[in-house]
Image (cartoon, helix red, strand yellow):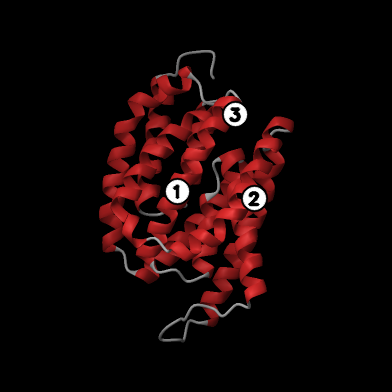
Amino acid sequence: MTAAEPTALDWSVLALGGLLIGFSKTAFGGMGTMAAVAFALVLPTRASTGTILPLLLVGDVIAVALYRRHADRGVLLRLLPSLVVGMLVGVAFLRAVDDLVLRRTLGVLLLVLALLQVLDVLRHRGSARREAPEHSPARARTLAALAGGGTGFSTMVANAAGPISSMYLLLMRVPKMAFVGTVAWLFFLLNVVKVPFSAGLGLLTAESLRIDVPLVPAVLVGAAVGSRVLRLVPQAVFERMTLALTAVAAVLLLVT
């Protein structure tokens, strides 16, 4: 944790991060990576990872309460096995090295995925309706394994898994409400599992919780705004916004 008490400017940046957490949990998940960057600007990288976790859980509880009935259980079940593996690898990674190389790698990967999605959108621009793509069972398993493993790994190391899961759901053409419901359950489960690991690694501490408490109202406000915005946004706009935020998140991972 920082040696000095956070300044007024520091608290402002952290509060903005709290708002982004709440908004990302109930509207556009890509903003979650921006929140992680905001916390990393004020706190040391490893300390920011532990500090942000309880606030993510606050947002997760709200998102699950709002969207729990919309989740696509089939998608969740396909992702869960590789999620667990990815998290365990992430724990080992945290014990061994810092996350600079990981951030750069994730950034490049997300930019490639975003480009592929843009090309897919352009191919279907003239279609009145875009159906979910057909995948062979082997290809579907491979995509789920890569997305699940990448999500589990990156959420454990850098709290930056939202764009990976978002790109997977976009590629699977999951409808808007099923999208947010699936993401709500996915990250609630992930973040609950992360708590003992983060505490064991010394990332989640009494000092980090002391910083979290005054930021909870910012998360609640962001979540309230996000839930209203989501219901006003059409499916096509939702997909474009998610794609754009994924690309922005990728750039942030490359430059921070």
Q: Is residue 211 left or right of residue 152?
A: left
Residue 28 coordinates in the image, percent (x, y): 40, 54
Tell me which numbered mark, 1 or 3, is placed earlier along the sequence: 1
List the residue tagged with mark 3.
Answer: 46
Determine whether, in the image, residue 167 is placed left or right of residue 54: right
Q: Quadrant of residue 234?
A: bottom left
Query: Which disc number belongs to residue 13?
Result: none
Q: Secondary structure at mark 1?
A: helix
Instruction: Give the residue pinned by disc 2.
Output: 106
Contact flag, marks 2 and 3 (Cβ < 8 Å): no
| Residue 153 appears in view | no
For marks 2 and 3 on the same chain, the one whose residue lies earlier in the sequence: 3
Residue 244 location (% of width, % of height): 48, 60
Label 2 to label 3: alpha-carbon separation: 17 Å
**Residue type marked 3:** Arg
Helix, strand or loop at label 3? It is helix
| Residue in the picture at 32% in, 35% down | 218
Q: Quadrant of residue 228?
A: bottom left
Q: Could you tell me which quadrant the N terminus lies in?
A: top right
- The structure residue drawn at horizontal position 49% and vertical position 32%, both measured from the top left corner, is 39
